[in-house]
Image (tube, rainbow, N blue to C red):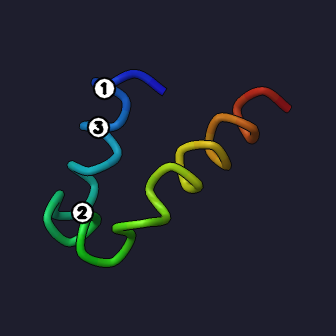
């Protein structure tokens, strides 16, 4: 996922909200999204 895609994802919510709720899961979340896009 590019930084722009990540920013777009964060813009759906508050970026701070995303970081607060997924501080250690952001990479996992990105991997899941990338896997879903690939399939």
Of the image marks 1 and 3, the number of the one nearer the N terminus: 1
- To which residue does mark 1 refer? 3
User: Does 21 sit above or below residue 18?
Assistant: below
Label 3 Cα crowd, 10 Å radius (few <14 / some 14-19 / many 20+)? few
**Picture quadrant of residue 5:** top left
Of the image marks 1 and 2, the number of the one nearer the N terminus: 1
- To which residue does mark 2 refer? 13
Q: Residue at x 63, y 43 (%)?
A: 31
Give the residue furthest to the bottom: 21
Please state the horizontal and vertical placement of residue 7, each as a whole percent of the image: 25, 37
**Picture quadrant of residue 36:** top right
Q: Quadrant of the C terminus?
A: top right
Q: Residue at x 39, y 70 (%)?
A: 22
Q: Secondary structure at mark 2?
A: loop
Of the image marks 2 and 3, the number of the one nearer the N terminus: 3
Please state the horizontal and vertical placement of residue 24, each as a whole percent of the image: 43, 66
Which labelled disc corresponds to residue 8? 3
In the displayed structure image, the side of residue 14 where residue 1 appears, left or right? right
The span from disc 1 to disc 3 (Cα, nearest Å) is 9 Å
Label 1 Cα crowd, 10 Å radius (few <14 / some 14-19 / many 20+)? few
Label 2 Cα crowd, 10 Å radius (few <14 / some 14-19 / many 20+)? few
**Picture quadrant of residue 28:** bottom right
């Amino acid at each position: 996922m590019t930084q722009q895609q990540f920013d777009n994802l964060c813009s759906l919510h508050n970026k701070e909200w995303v970081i607060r709720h997924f501080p250690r899961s952001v990479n996992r979340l990105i991997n899941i999204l990338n896997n879903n896009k690939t399939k």
